[in-house]
Amino acid sequence: MIRKIKKIGLVFVGLVAIVGLVLTVTTSPALAKQKTWRLRGQAAWGRGIKQLWGATEKVAELIECYTAGRVKLELHTGGELVGTLEEYPSAGSGALDFGMGCPCYAMSRCYALPFFCDSPGNISGTEKIVWLYHGGGLEIFQDLFKKHYNVMAFPFAIQTAEVFLYANKEIKSLKDLKGLKMRAAGLRADIMHYLGGSLVVLGASEVIPAMERGVIDAFEVSNIALGQEVGYLEAAKYLYFTPRKTNHSLLLIVFNLEKWNSFPKDIQKKIAQACHDSVLWAYAWNREADVVAMKKATEKYGVQLKLMPEEVMRKFNEAALTLYAKKAQKDPEVARVMESWEKFSKEWGNIAPFVDYLDKTGGYFGQMIPYSEMKKRVAK
């Protein structure tokens, strides 16, 4: 009898152990259904502008892909959920899970953040990418957004260089800038005013009719591919590019900080990687679109592509950097960016002369010696 009871007891203990093992396996985190997030947010632009919305959709696609579908972005256009340009504060307050915009939209709260945009005298696109991910730039970027908006920020696209100036009057020297009626915004407006331009405050959507009526003679807005989309190539006779360093805008996404901190570390890492890879994709995508737009500008619209005179650009950049140095004396955040650029220059500057040779056309497209010529040579 006692032996029988012992056997029953052993069987019972074994069953308990098996049941416990089953419960442990079926409830383990690895096999349990993983948590997913559907984030609701807004970009400061609409679906109609391909050069902006294309990059917006790409980063959403990459985030969903990299997180294996655990994070999905519900995209809305400017004004659908909150007021346009209210994306950053709305994400910070929790009214949105995320917001998308440009660094210059943060200028009212933080004068240092537009330096991550197309600020005159700034570092070039390739430099900016390297500075962000290898020179400490991203840390400053995120610190400033956390402080001023209570968000975690990531660049997700870099635009190609903005057209320095769309103009209906030819510019040959500094004299031609005196009294030139122009639309400019942000830091560029301050500098153009310093050089003698007569500035007119206009929204980007108002520049075409203003050019047609002669209200303005020139304007600056974004890169040439975007300009083609919205009709800017039809509004100007000349498109001026800078013969010196080109400046590039970033597009960025900010996540509500509390929401961001609730993500597991692996999810945070995958979102960060998706944003980084989206930046590289966008840069190549924009370069392709710009080259195609340049060809269309000259062939379809008869626009003349020109370089700003060296004298004008030298004075412009000197004015820009003088302004920044003055701001940095009173604003430690601006000083932090300036000092970081200086450190970056010292650490990376020795390779600078060779970077432009990574993708140099030599001033013409095609083979170094045209195939038609080589065909004649070998036929002899």
Image (cartoon, rainbow, N blue to C red):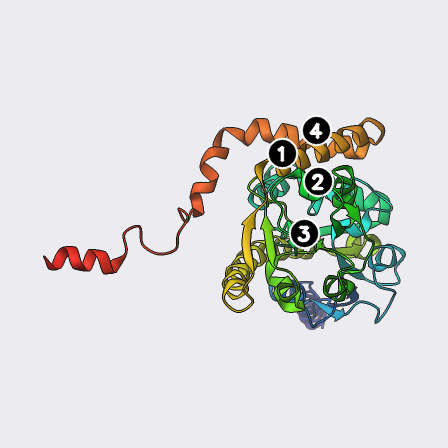
Given the image, on which type of amino acid does mark 4 rest?
Glu
Residue situated in front as seen by the camera: 374 or 62: 374
Mark-to-mark CA distance, 1 and 2: 31 Å
Residue 98 appears anywhere in the view: yes
Mark-to-mark CA distance, 2 and 4: 14 Å
Q: Earlier in the sequence, mark 1 or mark 3?
A: 3
Q: Is disc 3 placed on a helix, strand or loop?
A: strand
x and y percent of residue 335 in the render?
76, 30
Which residue corresponds to the image point at 90% horizontal and 56% vertical from the top-left?
Answer: 93
Given the image, on which type of amino acid does mark 3 rest?
Leu
Q: Nearer the viewer, mark 1 or mark 4?
A: 1
Mark 2 and mark 1 in contact (Cβ < 8 Å)? no
Which numbered dot is residue 139?
A: 2
Q: Nearer the viewer, mark 2 or mark 4?
A: 4
Q: Which residue is mark 4?
A: 339
Q: Quadrant of residue 31?
A: bottom right
Mark-to-mark CA distance, 2 and 3: 15 Å
In the picture shown, does residue 230 fall above or below 107?
Answer: below
Q: Which residue is mark 1?
A: 314
In the picture shown, does residue 183 fall above or below 48?
Answer: above
Q: Earlier in the sequence, mark 1 or mark 2?
A: 2
Q: Nearer the viewer, mark 1 or mark 2?
A: 1
Mark 3 and mark 2 in contact (Cβ < 8 Å)? no
Q: Which residue is mark 3?
A: 250
